[in-house]
Image (cartoon, helix red, strand yellow):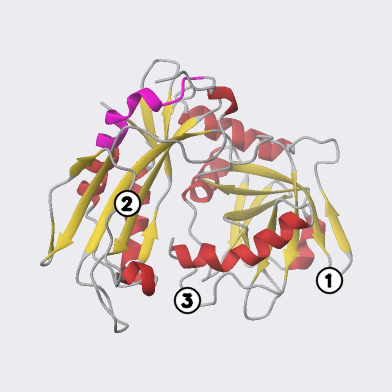
Amino acid sequence: MDILDWKNLPFGYLKTDYNIRSEYKDGKWGDLEVSTSEYIDIHIAATGLHYGQEAFEGLKAYMGKDGKIRLFRWDENAKRLILSADGIKMARVPIEMFRESIFQVVKLNKRFVPPYGSGATLYIRPLLYGSGAEVGVKPSAEYTFIVFVTPVGPYFKNGFKPVNVVICRDVDRAAPKGTGIYKVGGNYAASLRADVAAKENGYVTSIFLDAKEKKYIDECGPANFFGIKDNTYITPKSESILNSITNMSLIELAKSLGIKTERRQVPVEELSEFTETGECGTAAVITPIGKIVDPDKNIIYEYCKDGNAGPVTQKLYNRLVAIQMGDAPDEFGWMTVVE
């Protein structure tokens, strides 16, 4: 393999050696198979193509200074994929099968795990979709599960630097009691109009408001939102946002650092009270927000006025990344060494 420029990797797809696959037929999952192909054979009437029976996960493998590869809270990804499968009536991927798949694919592609200190990681993408043929609207009888990996750099090219975002009121990512809590492709497709418009206007992403009343913060593009005020980490509670594993972890970290936490509805007007804001998720980890622009109200909420992340955001980021890289004690039992 040509030596990759690890420190300048994009957050994009690069071919690796192997992926793992399994098919669900006749009510049971088949054996895991190793493939070198980047492509799949799929029936033209597969429910994943026509009726959106598709869910996925995203997690990372980290190379430590000690030469050990670690995975972060993989079991929570396995549980969330089960939740998504239940939500759109697909066959569940058993937790042990999920574990075997991701550990095997990381070991098979070990040479693509970016070195310690490069700022890059190995991104792991489990994918589940309806592969059986149906023309009527109903769940498939057959499913395919695939796990592939690719080395990636920071989600935002400037890394851990403040970004500017815009509030969007004319696009809804998901409806209450809809599929917003599941990690399914349709939610991301629904967000693309807002995402493209935000980028065309010079912003990194959009902040979505609740679809019912347009009063409360929901998601921040493809990530969860949080705000800091009065030594409190505040993040939205909503029945239409994804339960971020990173956000869940930051809440636990905050408590351990003596920072209070609240998960509740966050009114748009409260943005003026925060001293720091940010977005969090597997891809970006934490991205501090510099400005939130509300074009409909002609208001700009400003944070990070010195161009750097706020002290609480910085502290949370440093602690989480140190645990993930194996540089700090894992008092929570989040990391698993790939052996």
Residue placed at 74% from the left, 64% from the top? 167
Q: Quadrant of residue 183?
A: bottom left
Q: Secondary structure at mark 3?
A: loop
Q: Are marks 3 and 1 in contact (CB under 8 Å)?
A: no
Q: Which residue is mark 2?
A: 78
Mark 1 crowd level (few <14, some 14–19, many ≥20, 10 Å Cα): few
Which range of residues does the magenta coloring cover? 103-116
Q: Is 274 positioned to the left or the right of 148 in the image?
A: right
Residue 100 in sight:
yes
Mark closer to the chain start, 3 or 2: 2
Is most of the magenta stretch helix, strand or loop?
helix
Given contact means CB atoms under 8 Å apart, are the residues at marks 3 and 2 in contact?
no
The residue that mark 1 highlights is 296
Foreground of the two, 21 or 311 = 21
Amino acid type at circle 2 is Ala
Secondary structure, mark 2, is: helix
- The residue lying toward the viewer, choosing from 43 and 198, is 43
User: How far apart are the two marked residues, 3 and 1, measured between alpha carbons?
Assistant: 26 Å
Q: Is residue 108 magenta?
A: yes
Left or right, residue 170 beside residue 333? right
Q: Earlier in the sequence, mark 3 or mark 1?
A: 3
In the rendered image, which residue does mark 3 sit on?
A: 178
Q: Secondary structure at mark 1?
A: loop
Whether residue 241 is visible, yes or no, is: no
Amino acid tagged 3? Gly
Distance CA(mark 3)–CA(mark 2): 21 Å
Tag on residue 285?
none
Q: Residue at x 43, y 21 (%)?
A: 64
| Pointer 1 with pointer 2, Cβ within 8 A | no
> Residue 113: percent from the left, percent from the top?
41, 26
Counting other residues with Cα less than 10 Å from the Cα at mark 2, is it few (<14), some (14-19), or many (20 or more)? many
> Could you say where residue 135 lies in the image, as x and y percent from the top left?
29, 81
